[in-house]
Image (spheres, rainbow, N blue to C red):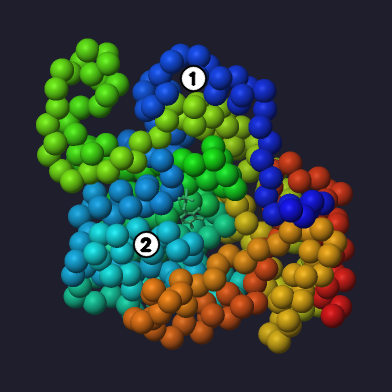
């Protein structure tokens, strides 16, 4: 394993985090229980949603969202190809068909409202946005579009913990939003996720499907609230456990501070990289957005050998990545894929640079120097 001087992302675990986790082990109750309920309440309040349903990972959150909103065979869901494959898989699990649509541009790699509108067909049931890097993108316009055409708006908010547009948390613009608490996300517990919704009936359905379609939980039976159960739907086991729920709540308390720190790093990156020839930046967050800055990506000039560029950063022990290899290029989704020149261009020319809350200016300077050097060719 390379010892990166600047890793792509990095996690700081505090004594408080550890204490919260250890307490749950000492309690003797490990699966979903009171800590999970506390996390759900805290998270719902934090994002301003009526309901919050904790699950085992972000992919489960996405799948549960698609399943509980009733997507199925014959339905089409408009979605960006420039996302993690789980976004698309979650749609496909239900039998619905993902319909790929273009991003806005090379400096705005999120689903275009115009492209989404053009992709609407009589079979379209929903639009799924993905808040790339914690940006709001076209979500407000897409919300209006969905309303006009009577479509569901679903949000993959995996990057968006702490991100608010005009005070409204991303993930709460549509009928449901899915968050990921994977290790490298802004709110990280290892494996975990959350679905949020304003809709009480949908929340009930989400809870039911999270745990085998059973009408009572083990915890309820343990507490003596329920003696038996019925199974009323084909559900899953997507439960989170208490240690991770406790870790999530401990970390949520400092998420805003960490995102502010990421914001400062974003501004500093822009100042330091702005004058380097051949290196393009994404649009800065719009003024009415508190961005979660999950990623910091640059876009290389056409014709630059990206592997070589990334190799030069790796030589200086600076880790980079690509977000994302577009899903419409993967073998299992290639067949029905439309032409997507902007997505393809972004996917071949973008490089994701290190970004994490406790990155030092010294580390950031190392990244910038490595980029400057690599851009010289
Ligand atoms: C991380 C991520 C997911 C999947 O979340 P997991 O918790 O890893 O299952 C889905 N969509 C996007 C955009 C992601 O970044």
> Which labelled disc corresponds to residue 89?
2
Residue at x 67% of width, y 23% of height:
15
Residue at x 71% of width, y 87% of height:
303
Q: Position of residue 129 (x, y in %)?
A: 41, 61
Note whether residue 40 is visible: yes
Quarter location, residue 346:
bottom right
State the residue lying farthest toward the front. 1
Total numbered labels: 2
Looking at the image, residue 3 lies above or below residue 130:
above
Q: Which residue is mark 1?
A: 24
> Which labelled disc corresponds to residue 272?
none
Q: Position of residue 10 (x, y in %)?
A: 69, 45
Quarter location, residue 206:
top left
Q: Position of residue 286 (x, y in %)?
A: 58, 59
Question: The residue tagged with tag 2: helix, strand or loop?
Answer: helix
Say whether residue 319 is left or right of residue 135: right
Q: Position of residue 111 (x, y in %)?
A: 45, 69
Question: The residue tagged with tag 1: helix, strand or loop?
Answer: helix
Looking at the image, residue 346 lies above or below residue 252:
below
């Amino acid at each position: 394993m390379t010892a990166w001087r600047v890793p792509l992302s990095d996690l700081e675990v505090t004594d408080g985090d550890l204490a919260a986790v250890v307490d749950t082990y000492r309690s003797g109750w490990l699966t979903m229980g009171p800590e999970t309920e506390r996390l759900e309440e805290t998270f719902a309040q934090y994002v301003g949603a009526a309901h919050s349903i904790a699950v085992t990972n972000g992919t489960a959150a996405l799948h549960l969202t698609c399943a509980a909103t009733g997507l199925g065979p014959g339905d089409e869901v408009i979605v960006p190809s420039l996302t993690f494959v789980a976004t698309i898989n979650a749609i496909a699990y239900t039998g619905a068909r993902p319909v790929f649509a273009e991003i806005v541009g090379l400096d705005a790699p999120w689903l275009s409202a115009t492209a989404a509108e053009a992709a609407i067909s009589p079979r379209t049931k929903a639009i799924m946005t993905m808040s790339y890097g914690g940006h709001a993108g076209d979500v407000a316009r897409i919300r209006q579009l969905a309303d006009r055409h009577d479509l569901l708006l679903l949000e993959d908010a995996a990057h968006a913990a702490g991100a608010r547009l005009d005070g409204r948390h991303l993930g709460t613009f549509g009928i449901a939003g899915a968050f990921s608490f994977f290790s490298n996300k802004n709110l990280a517990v290892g494996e975990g996720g959350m679905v949020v919704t304003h809709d009480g009936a949908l929340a009930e359905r989400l809870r039911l499907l999270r745990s085998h379609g059973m009408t009572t939980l083990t915890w309820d039976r343990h507490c003596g609230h329920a003696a038996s159960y019925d199974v009323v739907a084909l559900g899953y086991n997507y439960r989170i456990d208490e240690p991770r729920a406790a870790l999530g709540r401990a970390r949520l308390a400092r998420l805003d501070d960490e995102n502010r720190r990421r914001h400062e790093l974003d501004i500093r990156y822009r100042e330091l990289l702005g004058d380097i020839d051949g290196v393009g930046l994404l649009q800065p967050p719009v003024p009415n957005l508190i961005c979660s800055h999950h990623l910091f990506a640059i876009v290389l000039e056409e014709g630059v050998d990206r592997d070589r560029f990334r190799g030069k950063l790796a030589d200086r022990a600076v880790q980079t990545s690509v977000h994302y290899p577009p899903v419409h290029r993967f073998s299992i989704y290639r067949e029905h894929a439309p032409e997507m020149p902007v997505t393809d261009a972004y996917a071949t020319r973008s490089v994701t640079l290190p970004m994490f809350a406790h990155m030092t200016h010294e580390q950031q300077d190392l990244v910038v120097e490595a980029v400057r050097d690599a851009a010289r060719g």
